[in-house]
Structure formats: C-alpha cells, structure tokens
Image: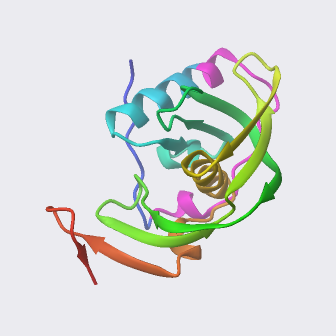
Amino acid sequence: MAIRIIVNEPDEVLHQMAKEVKKITPNVQKLLTDMADTMYDAEGVGLAAPQVGILKRLIVVDVGDDNGLIELINPEIVSSEGEQFGPEGCLSIPGYRGDVRRALTVTVKGLDRNGNEVTYTGSDLLARAFQHEIDHLNGVLYTDVAERVYQITSEGEEKE
C-alpha cells in the first residue's frame, strides 16, 4: 500500500492534458493500485493520475456501489444523456465545493489494468465521478465549469 501525495490547486499539472497510455506495464498497474490506495485514504470517490502529479490518462473511481473499484486506462465518454445539477468537491481543492451541471447518465469505455476493453454505464454519482475524473485528464477542474464555488467550514457549512 503506497499513499501518494495529492497535488493541490494551483499546481500547473492540474491544468495540463494527460498523455495516452500506449503500453500497460507493471509500473502503470502499480500506479493504479497506488491511486486507489490514495483515494481511499483521502476518503474520495475518484482520483485521476494528474492529481498525483502524473500526466497519464488513468482514473480510479469507487462510489460505494456494486461496481466497487473501477480502474480505467485511456477512458473516454462515448455517450451521455439527461442532466443533473449539484455539489461537487475535489481532493485537489480541499475545503471548497461547487455547483456543477453534468450529464445524468454516461457510458465510458477504456482499458482495465490487463488491457481488456471495458465499458461502464453509470448514473447519478457514478456518472458525475466519471465526468469529473475524465475532465482532470483534459486539464479541466470542476471550478472551471461550476456555476458557483463556495468554501466549506470545518463544521460542513457553506461560506461564501
């Protein structure tokens, strides 16, 4: 178990385009494991490789549903429908939330850690997590697309 340091805004790596993974190596697989360990340790529901300072197209997501841990290499959204609007946070922007409009349901495809093509369709929180993490791979933070950003106090209350 290796916990990586989560990069915080305004680090420039968070605003850059991640590179496609051309070959799945043991180092890529270890990075996926480390990312999952880091996400769980930080009590998040998703993490993208740029958030640990690595510009590779890798994400991990676990929203606590029947899917469990989802690891995706070179993920892309292939379809989306509907709309949801609600609060979003980010491990790289601690202490803040934003109100973000996202698709209600998305289908994503990518590769698993063994190079097999996988497809997931998710709604609600899973759809939000997929969109949020894939945005990270494109150098986009939720604060770039939020309609409102606000600080969260230590008691969990909003503060303008």
Q: Does 17 lie within the magenta span?
A: yes
Q: Nearer the viewer, residue 108 or 140?
A: 108
Residue 57, percent across and down? Answer: 70, 42
Residue 63, percent across and down? Answer: 49, 38
Q: Where 141 falls versus 71 (above or below)?
A: below
Q: Name which residue lies at 74% across and 15% down.
A: 114
Q: Is residue 42 left or right of residue 114?
A: left
Q: Is residue 140 left or right of residue 9?
A: right
State the extent of the magenta-drawn residues as a range: 11-29
Q: Quadrant of the N terminus?
A: top left
Colour mapping: rainbow
Q: Name which residue lies at 40% across and 52% down.
A: 91
Residue 23, percent across and down? Answer: 80, 25
Q: Name which residue lies at 59% across and 64% down.
A: 15
Q: Nearer the viewer, residue 134 or 108?
A: 108
Q: Where 76 falls versus 16 (above or below)?
A: above
Q: Nearer the viewer, residue 58 or 45?
A: 45
Q: Name which residue lies at 59% across and 54% down.
A: 128
Residue 156, percent across and down? Answer: 21, 62
